[in-house]
Image (spheres, rainbow, N blue to C red):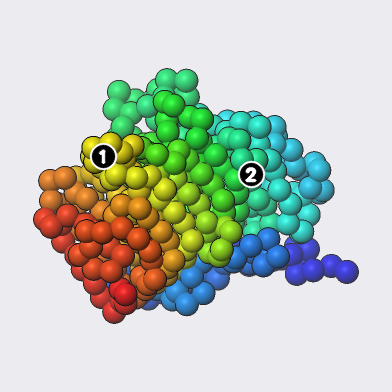
Amino acid sequence: MNTLLDRPFLPALLALLLLGCGGGKGPAAGGTVPTYLPTDPTTGPAAGNPDGRYPVPAEALAQDVSRPDQVIGTGTPESCTPEAFIAAVAQGGKITFNGGSKPFTLTLPRPAKVFNNKPDVVIDGGGVVTLSGGGRTRILYMNTCDPDQVWTTSHCDNQEHPQLTVQNLTFIDGNSTGETQYDGGGAIWVRGGRFRVVNCRFFNNACASLGPDVGGAAVRVFSQFSGLPVYVAHSTFGGATGFGNRGSNGGGLSSIGVSWSIYNSLFSFNQAQGNGANPPQAGTPGGGSGGAIYNDGNTMRLGIYGTLIEQNQVNAHGSAIFFVSNDGTGTVHIEDSVLRRNLGGSWYVRPGLSMDAGSRLEVVNSTLQ
């Protein structure tokens, strides 16, 4: 029997829905609450906060992949190979999969790496593709300052391209614990250009468990172009017992000097496993801050909209969020969101939230408990 996903008109219809239109409010003016591709509940918690209804700006919507540059597979899951995926990412452009309508997994032998002299990369899993690191490797890597990936400007830490978008995907068992030069980022590590996450799930990803500044069990990001934010929309990090991500700091996300705008997402059951904070207390290895989110740097902004952050755990600070702007110019904005029942740690300005005294805290129609 054919399913809705087999009908030829549906991809175009979904693309129109994802592009969105209409009103909005506040920072998301001009946004909408789009319809997203469903994720199979038998493969883990669904993507996104089920109660999240905050309007999403155009910049945080999924990209149109109705005319892909590369299609991986010829109709069966077996035809979608890890090597084909790694090669496609290296070539860039809009990447989709033709592996059928049922969920399937690609287990990578090494990270797929973006080359800086290729087109921007959009990877769309159609709601059925899972990318796995097999508990042995990171899954995706982009670094505008890595000469092995080709330098394309004299200001690699502040260049507009490449831009990487991951959408309608699940990332599992990414593991960067063996990385020494570019640590953290168990599933995804990004520096430079722009980065966007839409309708994705991150389960059981891991980075180094100890250290004062290593982090991002799922995702780690550095130096985005012109200080523009990383967008995360309708995505899940953990979501249930046995699905959480874990690392020294930032069980879900970690960054240095990067702004974030996070919409209608779910962070739960993630762990910051380090011990001794940053700088590390005497006799400790350091780390253990930011159960869900770890932000460090100077002028940066963390925006949380329509998002649920609960039951994350730390040993040091910020069981939900750790945010430190070293020069006191940062802002944390929490709107239409809930932070609750996050565990462990100390130095709280509000339940679950550890942040420096100089930065600005804005809480709108939200619960922190």
Q: Nearer the viewer, residue 67 or 55?
A: 55
- Residue 54 drawn at (x, y percent): 40, 73
Quick one: which residue is furthest to the front in this view?
Answer: 283
- Residue 197 drawn at (x, y percent): 48, 53
Mark 2 element type: strand
Q: Earlier in the sequence, mark 2 or mark 1?
A: 2
Quarter of the image with the N terminus in it: bottom right
**Residue 201 badge:** none
- Residue 281 drawn at (x, y percent): 24, 41
Could you tell me which residue is drawn at 47 percent across and 63 percent down?
268
Question: Is 165 left or right of 350, judged from the image as shown?
Answer: right
Could you tell me which residue is drawn at 63 percent across and 67 percent down?
38
Q: Is residue 57 above or below residue 275?
A: below
Q: Is residue 286 above or below residue 49?
A: above
Quarter of the image with the C terminus in it: bottom left
Question: Is 5 left or right of 335, judged from the image as shown?
Answer: right
- Identify the residue under disc 2: 132
Question: Is 153 left or right of 85, judged from the image as shown?
Answer: left
Mark 2: few/some/many CA within 10 Å (<14, 14-19, 20+)? many
Q: Nearer the viewer, mark 2 or mark 1?
A: 1
- Separation of residues labelled 2 and 1 (CA atoms): 32 Å
Mark 1 element type: loop
- Residue 214 drawn at (x, y percent): 37, 38
The amino acid pointed to by label 2 is: Ser
Question: Is 261 left or right of 15, judged from the image as shown?
Answer: left
- Identify the residue under disc 1: 280
Q: Is residue 111 visible?
A: yes
The amino acid pointed to by label 1 is: Pro
Could you tell me which residue is drawn at 42 percent across and 20 percent down?
147
